[in-house]
Image (cartoon, coloured by chain):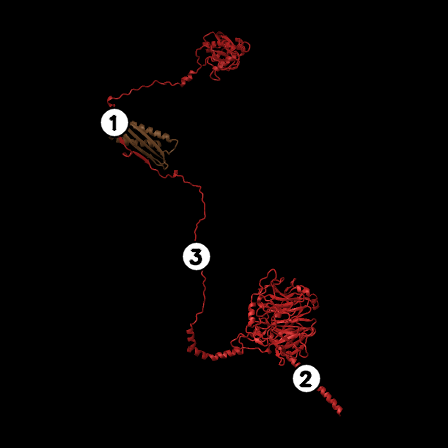
Amino acid sequence: MSTKRPKSTTTTSKGKDKKADESSAGSVAGSGHPNDILPLTLTSATQELFGCRCDEDVTGDNPYKILRKEDIVQDMRMRAAVSDFSPMKQLVLDYPEDELLLVYDRDFIYGSSFYLVLTADAKERHLKPVVALGVEVALEREPSEVFATQKTSEPQPWISLGSEQEIEEESVTDSRPRLKYRISRVRREFGAPIFFSDRNAMETKDGFIECTPYQDKNFSLKQMERHTGVQTIPNLKSSSTQTQWTYPRSMCTQYEPREFSEEKKENCLQSEKLKNFVNSVASRFEMAIQQNEIMDVFFDDWKALSEEDSGYGRKADPHLKEYQSFTDLHFSKEKTISNINWHPTINGVIAVAVTERLSFEDRINGSTKLLLNPSLILFWSFSDPINPQLLLECPDDVFSFEFCPSDPNIIVGGCMNGQVLTPSLSLSLSFSLNETPVVRYCAVSGIENGHKAPITDIQWLPGTFEVSRMGVPMENKNGICVQIVTCAPDCCVMFWDIRAPRVLQTMADQRKQKVEEKPLENPHGVPNTFKHLDLTWKPLIRVSLPKIDTSGEYSPLKISLRDNTCDNHTGSNAGEYLPSSSTLQLVLSTTFCPQDGELVYTDWKLEKDNDSGRLFSAKPSHRFIIHDGQVNTVRRSPFFKDIILTVGGWTFAIWKEGVTNGPIIQSSCSQKKCTVGYWSQSRPAVLFIGKEDGNIDVWDLLEKTHEPSQTQNITATQITCIKPWIVSSKQHLLAVSDHLGTLHILEIPWTLRSPSSNEKLSMSKYFEKEVDRLVYFEKRREMRAKEKKDYEAEELRKKTVRYSI
Amino acid sequence: MPKGASLFRCVSVSKLSVLQCIQSIIGEESYRQDTVNQWTAKIVEQALTLLVKQTKSYKYIVSCAVMQKSGAGLHTANSCYWDTVTDGSCTVKWENRTMYCVVSVFAVALTP
């Protein structure tokens, strides 16, 4: 147990607390108490008995009470078990001294209110230290540090508090006495020689042990699941090819039928077999050919029985349908169209001559203004109805113009002032610019050489003819048209040649020509084709028309040439054929004054007057007055070469050449004046008449002859020109121009363009019938006249007889 | 005592005895990890006791190895440097369905 330890407490308390601290510091266990004290509880009776009442006899300050041993023993005897001291009876008896110390344990430090000190030493200890401690307490009142060392304390004897037991437990001591052995060995056995050697593992069969490994299914884990990734990729394969480049070569193959060689052919032809065969078969062959000639075995009677019924539905619409119309605001305003011509080779192109719409007086009055406006021939194309494709500039208004039949690039026109001009179209008409190209005329005749009046008709001589200066027609070997005929109301018919006059050339002229052959300037971009004619053009022949009965001359308006073309293609067989002058006749329409319409039939050959040697033209052979007004159209039928149509005034008439009695057909007077007429190109019996009020009359002579079979109004003003044209078998067009300057293109319906079967034959028969009628009519007239004469003679004779009697 | 002959006799006898001792301890058992230590200790003790009972003046060294049958392989070998006349050893391999047991006994003579 602990010895007196230096106070290490900070709390200052007197007596009991100190003691308590001391003793509590000394005790080891929390609930235990030192062995030399014994806590006990005293009842109040015992307390009174021993004079140790709580808080009266013993207090906190004075907790000690000395008790006598005898008193305690007596108490124990008297009260035996009830006595509080009974549990420690033995202890009390064993106590060596006479007085025991009882300590009042006020704070129940040991669990009871009192405790008894059991040993004298402890008693002494309790009593004495109080005294000592009391002294110390008086000394050390103030709180101080721990290091208060006992400077003045003396070494006390060690009091065991039970700690030596622990030490004893930890220390190592012998639990039993140590054993001693003694081993001895015989001396001689020490250091005996040893005989060691190796015993290797391989030497004995026990040297090595092996447990061979094996596949144990219990310990082999089969992997049931496994995470793997799989990726598919397309199978990529790169490869290349290279073609061999070969040179391209053009090759061609030409087939020829295999034929016998020449020799073999000859042999064949000469062979006997062929000769015999031909001889044997010839007669039969001849018969067969003759039969074929007699009758056509392939003639289809059934088909020819009826007319073509195709297009049955279309028969209901016999009207001319408007296909297109052309008007130009710039060029044909205030103007009228005087002539129309279809381009002979280019499809869909039509040329129109545009003239001023003024009377003669107005023309003179406004002549200065007219000079500024150029006169034009417009070219229209079906592709562009608004802008003309080409403009031909003319010095003056053109009344009539014609394409050259052999060379469509050359046009010849007759002007108002009597000039003849030839514009030459070297441009192609297929392209169209934004601005209409203007072409100037190539050549124009000199004014003094030309007509004195407006040229009303101009025509090309057919390519087979050529007229010499003497008026003798010759054969034109070239086949191209080089000569033209013009007529004007100045009583002249002129023949012109477009070639350079080479008859006049002499050596001097040739030299001059050479000098002149320097390239001339071309101010207007006009080709030099007709430069030789420009302004120097003179007519080849001038034919005047003297009147038959009276003097004076006819003023022709229109010409119609009778053409007998000779066939030049079979050159080897036919010899030279000079057409006689009599075959080239002219049928002229003349007007003497605007009201008369005369038809003159003449031959234009110049005869030589034997007397003067001058050339003069013969008188016309026939003349007829049929129409009431100007004869404005003289046209031959395209199907019959000797049938002529004349239109004038209010009627039209059909003539046959050679029949000089009169027209074979003459129409009745119509309501309005007939202005122009034309035969149909495809039907021999149909003709178109244009009227003053813009109507077109379609006459079908096989249908009815007293009135037109069809009338159709085209425009509001008078119709100035009609020209039909065949584009294709399905499309026939009719070009109609009116007084306002508009060109209408009409489509001819099927009924009017497809001929009925045998139409030509029927027409010719009809004409013959009419001719017969005329002849009969003449005969009857003669007969009537003769009858009348006879009757009158008879009457006279009767009268004279009566008188003579 | 005739050392060589006795040695051989000793070997076969001791082999049998060791086998018996093994059989008695782990003959019916299956391999168990928590008791195998006890088995090896027992085997060694018993074997040693049996050998010592033969009252020959030998030093005995007994070693025991128990291996679970798992398909693995085990290979041991031993070699000695001794007096080949007087000393000897023997090795016993025993197996059942689940384990192997290898016991080796070395006997080194003590000079009397």
Q: Quadrant of residue A775?
A: bottom right
Q: Position of residue A730 (x, y in %)?
A: 59, 67
Q: Position of residue A749 (x, y in %)?
A: 62, 68
Badge 3 element: loop
Q: Spot the residue most to the bottom.
A: A805
Mark 3 and mark 2: Cα distance apart in space: 102 Å
User: Is the Cβ of the residue at disc 1 closer than 8 Å to that at disc 2?
Assistant: no
Disc on the earlier residue, 1 or 3: 1
Does residue A73 appear to the left or right of A682 in the view shown?
Answer: left
Residue under label 1: A194
Mark 3: amino acid: Trp
Q: Position of residue A20 (x, y in %)?
A: 50, 13
Chain A, chosen colour in render: red
Q: Which mark is residue A245?
A: 3
Subunit under mark 3: A
Q: Which residue is painted at 71% across and 85% down in the image?
A: A788
Q: Considering depth in this image, is A716 or B34 the residue closer to the camera?
A: A716
- Numbered disc in front, either 1 or 3: 3
Q: Which residue is painted at 56% across and 65% down in the image?
A: A519
Mark 2: amino acid: Met
Subunit under mark 2: A
Q: Which mark is residue A783?
A: 2
Marks 1 and 3 share the same chain: yes
Badge 2 element: helix
Marks 3 and 2 share the same chain: yes
Mark 1 and mark 3: Cα distance apart in space: 104 Å
